[in-house]
Amino acid sequence: MQIQNLLNLGQALKEKREDQGLSLEKISDWTKINVSTLQAIEEAQVDRLPVYAYLRGFILSYAKALGMDEKEIEKELKTLVSQSENSQLNNMHPSSSVSPSSATENFVEKDLRLTPIILAVSILFILGSILVFTNIIQSYKKGSEQVENPVDHSDPVDQLKDNDKNRKEDTLSLDKPNSGEQPIDTKEHKEKTSPSARESTVELVDQNQEKANESEIQSAPTPEPKLINNQKSSLELVVKALGEVKIFYQVDGQEKKTVSLKEDQFEVLQGKKGILIETDNSDLIYIFHNGEDKGLFGSGGKKEKLFN
């Protein structure tokens, strides 16, 4: 079977169907193809036909239902696709002037044209979804901030009135004496609280504090040094420094030694025969001889003394 164009193919399928006395509705029941699509195939109505990928399957199903050779029909379809664009349709339906090869290419191009459109619609849908989701999140955050920091919608004039009323109440509570207390003489209170009265009060307090400190210093007993041993030796000297001083001492005729003391420090010396004390500042050391208070070592300057 030689098929030169799509119209010849459609007419061949129609003649085969009519020879067998079959209607388009019957073929539609067998192949599950719409009657309108079967009619468009028979009449080569390109505008009503689907894209080539579906059209090829419809034609082969139609031919199989009529008992035609599917391989031969598929071969003829490939021949139609490979025809040049310059070939013209013969006996084409008056309403169409498109060549079979161009019709086939149109089916393919229709798929290609749909692809970017679908892609663009998908991108717009995704962007719209992101925008809506962002707006929802921002609205939720604003609502949370308003709950955490509620806005005070009260009238500012009312707030000022309340503040003034509170201040007046505080003033009245300060002026009113407590129960059981004598009312304050305003004149006397002002005199007592005047700057000159406060200064004289401060001076009086300072003078009393100085006198108390002096009396404490004078009445403070001189601490007695503790003995090194519970048992007293035959001779014991305790030297207390009233300031920073250097002392030279010799115990029982042994080698002379030196010790430096700071204020309020003690040096305990023990011996049997005698203890020699020498210093350049005799008024800076205090002497205790065998527990007896001997007072200052001297009145000042260098002094040397033997204790036995």
Image (cartoon, rainbow, N blue to C red):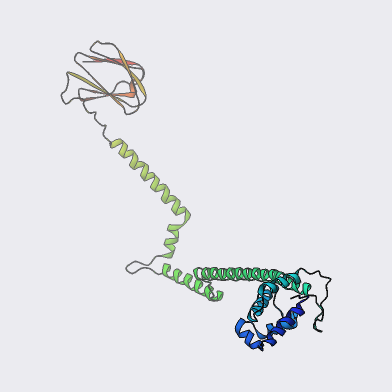
Q: Nearer the viewer, residue 214 or 227?
A: 227
Q: Nearer the viewer, residue 299 or 7?
A: 7
Q: Nearer the viewer, residue 55 or 244?
A: 55
- Residue 49 lies in what quarter of the image? bottom right
Task: Indicate whether 293 appears above or below 151.
Answer: above
Count the numbered circles shown. 0
Q: Given the current orientation, which residue lies at the most extreme left position? A: 231
Left or right of 236, for residue 10: right
Residue at the spot 65% in from the left edge and 68% down from the top edge: 123
Left or right of 23, for residue 4: right
Q: Quadrant of the C terminus?
A: top left
Q: Position of residue 282 (x, y in %)?
A: 33, 20
Left or right of 240, for residue 35: right
Residue at the spot 31% in from the left edge and 23% down from the top edge: 285
Q: Position of residue 118 (x, y in %)?
A: 67, 71
Q: Position of residue 161 (x, y in %)?
A: 52, 75
